[in-house]
Amino acid sequence: MLLTGGSPALFRDAGLRVDDYAEVRVERARTVDLVWRGDGLESSVTSRDEGCCARVIGRSGSAFASSTAVDAGPVLRRAARDAVELGCAAGRLAAHRRYRDDRPGEAGELAETVGLAEKVELLGAYHAAALAAHPGVTGALVYYRESVADVELLTSEGTGVSYRRRDLTLQITVYADGGAARTAGSVSAGSGGDFSVVRGLAPDVEAAVATAVDLRAAPVVAPGEYDVVCDGPLAGIWAHETIGHLAEADHHLGDAPLQRSLAPGRRLGPSMLTITDHPGRPGARGFVPVDDEGTAGSAVELLRDGVVTRPRLHDRSTAAAFREEPTGNARALNFRHPPLPRLRTIAIAPGAASEEEMIGGVAHGLLARGVLGGQTDRAGFTFLPAECREIRDGEVRGRVRGVVLSGDVLGAFAAIDAIGREQWRGDTSASCGKQGQNALPVSSWAPMLRLRGIRVTSG
C-alpha cells in the first residue's frame, strides 16, 4: 500500500467541509528509455518518479494540488485551502459505479522481467540491420520506452482502489537520401507492457528500409480529391481523432453546435458503421478497467448503424453537468494532472467487404497504410500515412510520397462506403495528447475503410 493511516483519518484531518468531496491519488513509477541514433546506442535512462495529488470539489470551490512527496496529508490540506481561497467555480460529481478488483491475471511477457542487456542486444540489432541494409540508407532512429506505475486512489466517499499501469512503445524510423527531401520508412509497435510485441520484427525493419529506399524514386502525389482505402491502423487513428475526440464530454460544455452535431438519433455515416469506445483487453495499451476516479469501465456505443447513440464520454463532473452516467473515461497522465474525459480503446466494428473488393472498386485513388501523425481541431482532420500506393482501375500501382489526407470531421463519415471484414487489433506507438497531458496510452481497433472523395495535398 502506498498510502498509510487509512482514509477516514486522512480526510478528517484535512479541514474539509461536511459536504466537500476529496480524493487522493499516489503513484510510484519506473520508466526505461533507450535511444539509438547515429552509429549506435545514444542513451539508456532508467528513471523513477513518485508523488501524489489531491482534488477537492465542494460548494465553496474546487482545487487540485500535486507534489513529488508521497505524504498525502499536506497535499490534501493544500487543495482544501485552495478550494476556498482561489474562488474557482464550485463543482459537483455524478454518482458512479465503483470498481471491484476483479482484474484478470497479467498478460504476455512482462517487460520488467526481461533484462536490460537483452533489450539492448535485441533493439540494437534492429538499428544495425537498418543501417547495413542498403547503401541508400542514411540513418536510423530507434526509440523504446517502457513504464510501470503503481497507483492507489482513496476518496472521501470511501472508495479505495489500487492498480498497476503498464505501457510499452517502440518506434523505428529508417531514413534514405531522397535528394530534395529525405524519405523514411517506419515500424511502430506497442502494448500494455508485453515485451513479446518487439520480438521478431526483423521482417518489419526490412520492409521499412524498402519503403524508405523506394520512395526516393516515387513521384510526389498530385493534389486533388481521391478515393482512399485505409488499412486498420490508419482507420483506427481516424476514428480516434474524429468521433473519439468529438465525444469527450468536456468539449460539449457550453458548445451547443457540437451538442447538436452529435445529438442522439442523428445520422452521421452509412448503415454499416458502428463505433464503440470501451475498456479494452488485458495486455493492450488502451486497457482501462478502472479510471482515475475509481469508476468501473463500461462500453460506450457512440454510433450504431451510422446513427449517434451515446454521444459523450464522461468523467464524474461532466456526467453531473449533463445528468448522465459516468462512463469510466476519467484519465490522468500521472499524479501531476487531474483526470479528464479521455479515450481508451476505440473500435470500428467489422463490415462485409474484402480487401480485394475495396481496392477493385476504385478507379483512381490511394491505398494508405499506417500513420506517421494525425490531429484534429474537432472541425477538420489531417493525417500523414506511413505509406501510400496509387490505385488505378482497381489495381495497386507504385508508391507516391508526400501524402497528406485532410477533410471535414463530420463530412468524412458520409464518405465511407465500404468496411473490411477483418478487424485489426494490434497496438502502435501512437499516443494521445490533451491539455498538456501527453502521451496517454490508447488503443484503436479497426478494419479497412474506403472513403470517397478525400482531399489530398502534398507535404
Image (cartoon, rainbow, N blue to C red):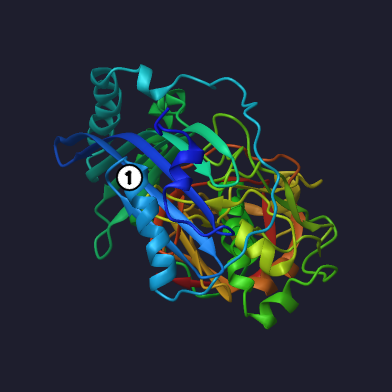
Q: Residue at x 47, y 51 (%)?
A: 332
Q: Position of residue 39 (x, y in %)?
A: 14, 37
Counting every numbered tag in the picture gives: 1
Would you identify the image quadrant in which residue 15 lies? bottom left
Would you identify the image quadrant in which residue 105 lies? top right
Q: 10 Å neighbourhood of mark 1: few (<14), some, or many (≥20)? A: many
Please state which amino acid type lies under the numbered disc 1: Thr
In this image, 392 relative to 13: left or right? right
Q: Position of residue 453 (x, y in %)?
A: 66, 72
Disc 1 target residue? 173
For the C terminus, the image quarter is: bottom left
Give the vertical position of 132 relative to 379 (above or below): above
Give the vertical position of 369 relative to 404 (above or below): above
| Residue in front for this viewpoint, 295 or 123 | 295
Give the vertical position of 2 relative to 270 (above or below): above
Q: Evaluate whether residue 113 shows in this view.
A: yes
| Residue in front for this viewpoint, 3 or 397 | 3
Helix, strand or loop at label 1? It is: strand
Q: Residue at x 71, y 39 (%)?
A: 422
Give the vertical position of 87 relative to 187 (above or below): below
